[in-house]
Amino acid sequence: MSRRRRREGPMPVTSAGLMRFFEEEIKGIKVSPKVVIFSAFLLITIVILLRLIT
């Protein structure tokens, strides 16, 4: 067994047999968790302010 297979651990068993999940990079927008949290906080603040104004 190679080093890589030992680090991955056992593969999950499904009803159709063995299934392996690959952790490959996919194309798309990459956003840090800090930006997501800040954006959510900003959106919540804007909604609250708009509700107070109207």
Image: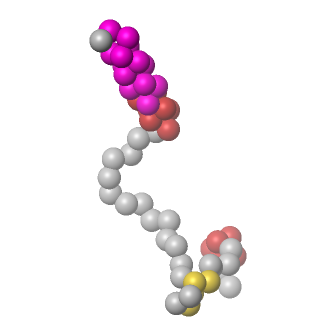
**What's the magenta bit mostly, secondary-structure-wise?**
helix
| Res 51 → quadrant | top left
Whether residue 28 is situated above or below residue 10 in the rendered picture? above
Q: What stretch is highlighted in magenta?
A: 40-53
Image location of residue 47, percent across then percent down? 37, 22
User: Foreground: 42 or 32?
Assistant: 42
In the picture as drawn, the residue positioned furthest to the front comes out as 54
* Residue at the image position 57 percent from the left and 84 percent from the top: 14
Residue at the spot 41% in from the left edge and 29% down from the top edge: 39
Whether 48 is among the magenta residues is yes
Above or below, comparing residue 26 to residue 32 in the picture: below
Name the residue at the bottom extreme: 17
Is residue 9 among what the camera can see?
A: yes
Is residue 44 rendered to the left or right of residue 53? Answer: right
Residue 42 visible to an observer of this rendering: no
User: In which quarter of the view is residue 40 placed?
Assistant: top left
Question: Residue 4, percent across and down?
Answer: 63, 74
Residue 20: % across, % down = 53, 78
Is 31 in front, or is 12? 12
Percent coordinates x, y for residue 26 in the rendering: 37, 60
Q: Residue at x 49, y 32 (%)?
A: 37
Q: In which quarter of the image is the C terminus?
A: top left
Residue that lies at the very extreme toward the left in this rendered image? 54
Q: Which residue is drawn at 38% across and 11% down?
A: 52
Towards the viewer: 49 or 36: 49
Of the pair 23 and 6, the residue shown nearer to us: 23
Q: Which quadrant: the N terminus?
A: bottom right
